[in-house]
Image (cartoon, helix red, strand yellow):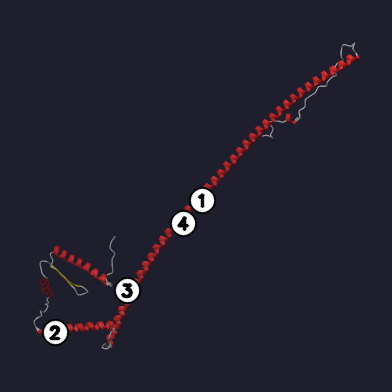
């Protein structure tokens, strides 16, 4: 990813300006040294920072004075040499420096608005124009910073909206998955309940069938017992009837023989016994013999 380009203009932040100056000064000296070594060039570089600090570079084979003299010869001018031992020259330099100091203080007072008594109308107009220009630059910089903040906030808002939308979709998908899972669980519960009800119905039907089979078996056993009791009772009645019939016949024969012997002693043959009608044994519950044991009543 390439480094972004920045606007070539004065950096307003003092700390950033000093850091940038230090980095770029080192890069400039490095490039100067490379140019001097690669091309065998004589280079002299003088740099003053915003604080007035001096930085210089000179080719190692020469010195700064030699390069300056060569520069003067090349352009056809010469810097006048001042005699530092001359008192008049020293006094003149002091007066020049004092005047520069007064001018600087005066310009500083103009910007701090401490004393306008010595200012003329032209000076005030000049100050007003400068202040207006400075105010315009400040407002432009302020608007630029505000616009940057607004752009940053809009980008952040866009990012937050995208994140919010993604979270919303994730939550919606989770809710849909949970609802689908609940529906599946409800369907499984309904199927399980239906299966249990079917099993209960089958169990009830099996119990009913077993009970019906048991009842039919009990009814059949009761019918067999009743039939056996009826047969036994019929046999007992027949046996009692035969015993009673033989006893009555014997008694009547004895009585008849006695009477005959008394009345007709000369008749050796007794009269025949009276004719007895045939007796048929009827059961006490005749309907039991006609019950169909395999009828639909006991099924």
At label 4, counting other C-alpha atoms closer than 10 Å, the crowd grade (few under 14, some 14-19, many 20 or more) is few
Instruction: Tell me if 91 is positioned left or right of 279 in this view.
Output: left
Marks 3 and 1: in contact by CB < 8 Å? no
Residue at 40% from the left image edge and 60% from the top image edge: 163
210 relative to 28 in the view: left or right: right
Q: Closest to the observer: 125 or 73?
A: 125
The answer to whether residue 87 is left or right of residue 110 is: left
Q: Residue 172 carries which label?
A: 4
Q: What element carries label 2?
A: helix
Q: Which badge, 1 or 4, is on the more N-terminal residue?
A: 4
Q: Is residue 143 above or below residue 97?
A: above
Residue at the image position 64 percent from the left and 34 percent from the top:
214
Distance between the Cα atoms at labels 2 and 4? 87 Å
Residue under label 2, please give it: 92
Q: Residue drawn 57% across and 41% down? A: 199
Q: Tag 4, which secondary structure?
A: helix
Q: Distance between the residues labelled 1 and 3?
A: 62 Å
Looking at the image, do the residues carrying marks 1 and 4 touch, with CB atoms under 8 Å apart? Answer: no
Residue 129 located left or right of residue 297: left
Determine the image quadrant of residue 130: bottom left
Task: Quickly name the residue at label 1.
Answer: 183
Residue to which mark 3 is pinned: 141
Residue 218 or 126: which is nearer the viewer? 218
What is the quadrant of residue 36 in the picture? bottom left
Does the residue at mark 2 contact the one at mark 4 (Cβ under 8 Å)?
A: no
| Quadrant where the N terminus is found in the figure | bottom left
Element under disc 1: helix
Q: Above or below — where is 174 with respect to 192?
A: below
In this view, the residue in front, 263 or 199, is: 263
Q: Position of residue 60 (x, y in %)?
A: 11, 66
Residue 258, percent from left and from top: 87, 16
Helix, strand or loop status at disc 3: helix
């Amino acid at each position: 990813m390439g480094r972004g380009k920045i606007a070539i203009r004065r950096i307003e932040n003092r700390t950033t300006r000093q850091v940038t100056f230090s980095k770029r000064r080192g890069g400039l000296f490095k490039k100067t040294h490379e140019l001097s070594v690669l091309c065998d060039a004589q280079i002299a570089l003088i740099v003053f920072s915003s604080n007035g600090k001096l930085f210089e570079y000179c080719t190692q084979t020469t010195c700064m004075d030699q390069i300056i003299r060569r520069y003067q010869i090349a352009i056809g001018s010469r810097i006048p040499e001042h005699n530092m031992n001359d008192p008049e020259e020293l006094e003149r330099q002091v007066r020049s420096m004092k005047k520069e100091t007064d001018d600087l203080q005066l310009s500083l007072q103009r910007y701090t608005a401490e004393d306008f008594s010595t200012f003329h109308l032209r000076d005030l107009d000049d100050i007003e124009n400068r202040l207006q220009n400075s105010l315009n630059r400040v407002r432009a910089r302020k608007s630029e910073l505000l616009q940057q903040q607004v752009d940053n906030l809009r980008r952040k808002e866009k990012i937050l909206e995208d994140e919010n939308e993604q979270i919303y979709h994730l939550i919606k998908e989770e809710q849909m998955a949970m609802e689908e899972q609940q529906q599946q669980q409800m369907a499984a519960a309904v199927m399980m309940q239906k299966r249990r009800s079917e099993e209960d119905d089958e169990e009830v039907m099996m119990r009913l069938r077993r009970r019906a089979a048991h009842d039919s078996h009990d009814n059949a056993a009761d019918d067999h017992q009743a039939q056996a009791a009826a047969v036994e009772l019929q046999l007992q009645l027949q046996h009692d009837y035969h015993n009673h019939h033989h006893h009555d016949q014997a008694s009547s024969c004895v009585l008849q023989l006695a009477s005959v012997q008394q009345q007709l002693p000369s008749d050796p043959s007794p009269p025949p016994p009276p004719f007895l009608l045939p007796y048929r044994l009827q059961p006490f519950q005749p309907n039991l013999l006609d019950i169909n044991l395999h009828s639909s009543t006991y099924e």
